[in-house]
Image: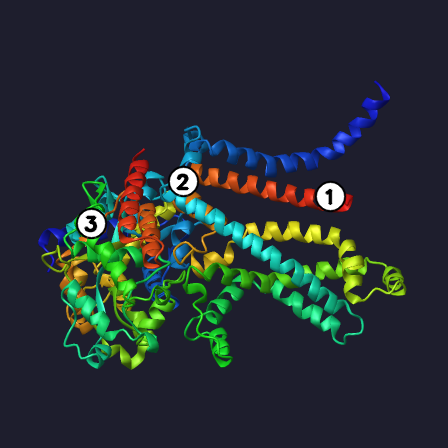
Amino acid sequence: MSMNAVSKQPVATMLAPAVILIGVFIFVPMLLTIWLSFHQWSSQTGFNTAEFVGLRNYEDIFGPLSVGRDFKRAFTNTAIYTALSVVIILPLSVLLGLLVYQRRVRGGTFLRTVLFATYMVPMIAVALVWSKLYSPTEGPINQILAVIGIGEQPWLSSPDTALVSIVILNVWQQVGYFTVLAIAGLTQIPPSLYEAARIDGANAIQEFFGVTLPLLRRTLLFSAVIAVINAVQVFEPVALITQGGPAGATNVLTYHIRRVGIERAQGGIGSAMAVMLMLSLIVVIIALFAFARKGNEE
Amino acid sequence: MKTPTTMIATGMLAAALMNSTAFAEPVELSYLTHWAPDTVALLEDAAADFAESNPDVSVSVRAVPFGDLLTTIRAGGGTTIAGIYDLWLPELVRDGLVEAAPDAVSSEVNEAWPAGIAAAASVDGTVYGIPNEINVYALNYNKALFEEAGLDGPPATWAELEAAAAAITDAEAGRQGFGLINSWAAGVVHPFSSLLVSNGGSLVVDGKPALDTDAAGETFALYETMVEKGYTVPAMGTADANTTGPFLDNFVSGNTGMIIMANWWESALKAGMGDAFENIATAPIPVGPSGDTARSISYSWLTVVNAGASDAEREAAWAFLDWLNSPESGENGASAMSGILMSMGILPSRASDVTAYEGDLDRDFLAGYVSVLENATAFPVVLGGQEFTEALQQTIEALEYGQVSAEEAQANAQADATAILERAQR
């Protein structure tokens, strides 16, 4: 027996449990979903009842009829929701992180606690409260807007504003978590770099763009990946508040896949939608890493 | 009045069930519903009554929002009994999720319920559940707003509906003449279907969608007109997962003059309006230009038993359901189930229950609904029915929000329905 074989055996033994667990609980379901996407299958019956239909499920979800229209709408809604959430949450978390991180600001710890508290509130409570806050006629938000002369907003009642309203709710709940991540990133920046920048005559804005932002890149990349994954998986506010309406304006992919795959038991079509969601997520995450790598190289 | 045959059958069934309810070991049943907490409490009381004579059987009631009901049933979740909307039955049967009723229960359903209601609880002639409620759609209107607008009575035709909506609408005061619901499939499609049948049309004829008819085109056009003229404000009609929300708030607040809804929302109106509920009246669905008489849509609910439950659970479940829906469980010859339903303003469907509650059904609000039952058409219960309903909902909402024209909505609705019903048959 060679030395290599001897040294590899314990490594394989040690890796086996993790590999088997990942294989069983991650890769097998993924492969099964891909396999089912080429079949007509009622999700209430065994896999042995699945009937091969080739690309028909994919033709249906990209077709002009309701199956296709609803999927494309849900896909677009998810993309808009994700983009808006990430674009708002990341800068806001850095801004709040900078404010809270200032050691000179009194009550910084209290502020951090308050910001993070929103992340710990159960979504069912958030949904109940926000659906009342958004009420067009009796909601406090519109009443406050009326005091400052802004007219009644339809919020969740109009296809033009419903998705944005859900994004605002998401930002409110998630920004505290990402602020904590930003603060963790800020603590890793050596104070000597700021001192050096100040000696060179840099003002606060130059310090931010010259020192803080470049050194926060890794934190921001991690935050962006987590924010994208969280946003793509949005389900609870839609299920609890809007049910995908009005006029499909808040119908996002996870909610739609649940409706198709479980409520209608169309496991094949639901799987095809899930595969498209998975592929899109992979593409976005790879693009984010590529963007970050390009930034590092520059 | 019960016929001798029915009485004998009931007696035999009761005797059979008396024998079958002696269980070898305690049985715990789980009853899934979407009812509100106060109604759940009534069901729990009935279960406690049943447990007095069946100490080995306990029933726990689990309530979920209406929007989660079908998913919860399909997910299993250890439910023995579930209350379901009849539209869901064909697919639940196809997927083997619900058990066929025992012969004794099946005979009882066919004898004690009107034929149409029993048929809605059956697939291919086999009974799968015990029907309980029937709901029918009618026009609810606010008499105070009508009086204020100088209107004598409810509209009988679409032209009068439009005129009444115009008279009541006051955009500056945030008031719409005619309310349409959105974000809830049945809340969107059932009122549309009621107007369609009152215009001489149908959703489905001989298993094929019939949304390409002139009658359907006129119904889509009515929606377009109502919105374009500002008589209907879609943003005031949003519903939430509990089938409440702005559409209800606006009607109880007097911001909506008329709305087409089913009888079951009486309890919600009473809770929201208090004394002002006396302003609410019920009228038949206005007749369209192609219609000849006021018609409407009806649908029913039934309780089914999980085919995946154990033998003992299924046996106990049928025994409990049969008792719950029998004249022996309630007061004055009515079933306990009908008492629960009447507490919500819901019409019971068993013939003996209708007789027992004859006096209560005369009250103003419900009498309007009872009067339209005669000309009500059952909402089509077909394979693919739920998807068909959701697709039509999306099309109608797109029309309401100005995303498509009436012509486009009609073309989309017919094409979608054709594809959905064909796929469901594969």
Front residue (pair A168, A131): A168
Label 2 marks a residue whose chain is A
Helix, strand, or loop for circle 1? helix
Query: Where does label 1 land, which residue?
Result: A293
Distance, label 1 to label 2, CA atoms, is 41 Å
State the residue at coordinates (22%, 81%): B148
What's under tag 2, amino acid-wise? Gln
> Which disc, if any, is residue A266?
2
> Which disc, if any, is residue A129?
none
Query: Where does label 3 land, which residue?
Result: B118
Label 1 or label 2, whichever lies nearer to me, is 1
Label 2 or label 3, whichever lies nearer to me, is 2
Label 1 or label 3, whichever lies nearer to me, is 1
Residue A4 lies left or right of residue B19; in this view the side is right
Q: State which quadrant residue A43 falls in.
A: top left
What's under tag 1, amino acid-wise? Arg
State the residue at coordinates (66%, 67%): A115
Helix, strand, or loop for circle 2? loop
Distance, label 2 to label 3, CA atoms, is 28 Å
